Image (cartoon, rainbow, N blue to C red):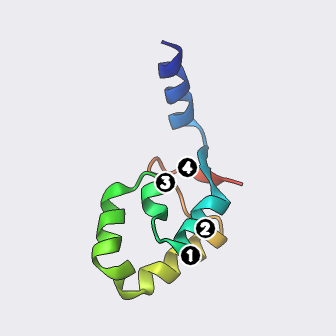
Amino acid sequence: MENNNTYIYLENSEISDRSWIVTLLLAIFLPVHRFYVGRIWTGIFYWLTGGLFGLWYIFDIVLILLDKFTDKYGRKLKK
């Protein structure tokens, strides 16, 4: 029962449990950052299109650097 309360708390929180720096490093070196933050379907699309031919790759890195990139629940990444 305690785990359910924790899950609800994290889902309703404004800050994600996913790290900003880990997301940035994954985006730059391995491009698996979308999977890390829980965006599985966009991660698959990202890989199939090569980061939308490189444009999506740059766009995501800029969003992460500007602290505008969010997890699958729309929460900001933890700094």
Name the residue type under label 3: Val
Label 1–label 2 contact, CB within 8 A:
yes
Query: Residue flagged by tag 4: what amino acid is it?
Result: Arg
Q: Does label 1 or label 4 sit earlier along the sequence?
A: 1
CA neighbours of label 3 inside 10 A, class few (<14), some (14 to 19), many (20+): many
Looking at the figure, which quarter contains the C terminus?
A: bottom right
Which residue is situated farthest in the right direction here?
79
* Residue designated by label 4: 75
Residue drawn at point x = 33 percent, y = 72 percent = 47
Q: Please report the residue visible at 35 percent of the width from the left and 56 percent of the height from the top.
A: 40
Count the numbered circles shown.
4
**Three-letter code, disc 2:** Leu
Q: Secondary structure at mark 2?
A: helix
Question: Disc 1 vs disc 4: Cβ atoms closer than 8 Å?
Answer: no
- The residue that appears at 30% across and 65% down in the rendered structure is 44
The answer to which of marks 1 and 3 sits earlier in the sequence is 1
Cα distance between the residues tagged 2 and 3: 11 Å
From the viewer's perspective, tell me whether residue 2 is left or right of residue 34: right
Q: Give the labeled residue for mark 2.
A: 24
Against 15, is 63 above or below? Answer: below
Q: Which mark is residue 37?
A: 3
Residue 28 is tagged as: 1
Crowd rating for badge 4 (residues with CA inside 10 Å; few <14, some 14–19, many 20+): many
Query: Of the residues tagged 1 and 4, which is closer to the observer?
Result: 1
CA separation in Å, label 1 and label 2: 6 Å
Mark closer to the observer (1, 3): 1
Look at the numbered disc 4 and give the secondary structure of its residue.
Answer: loop
Gap between marks 4 and 2 measured at Cα: 16 Å
| Mark before the other along the chain sequence, 4 or 3 | 3
Q: Compare residues 62 and 47 and report the one nearer the observer.
A: 47
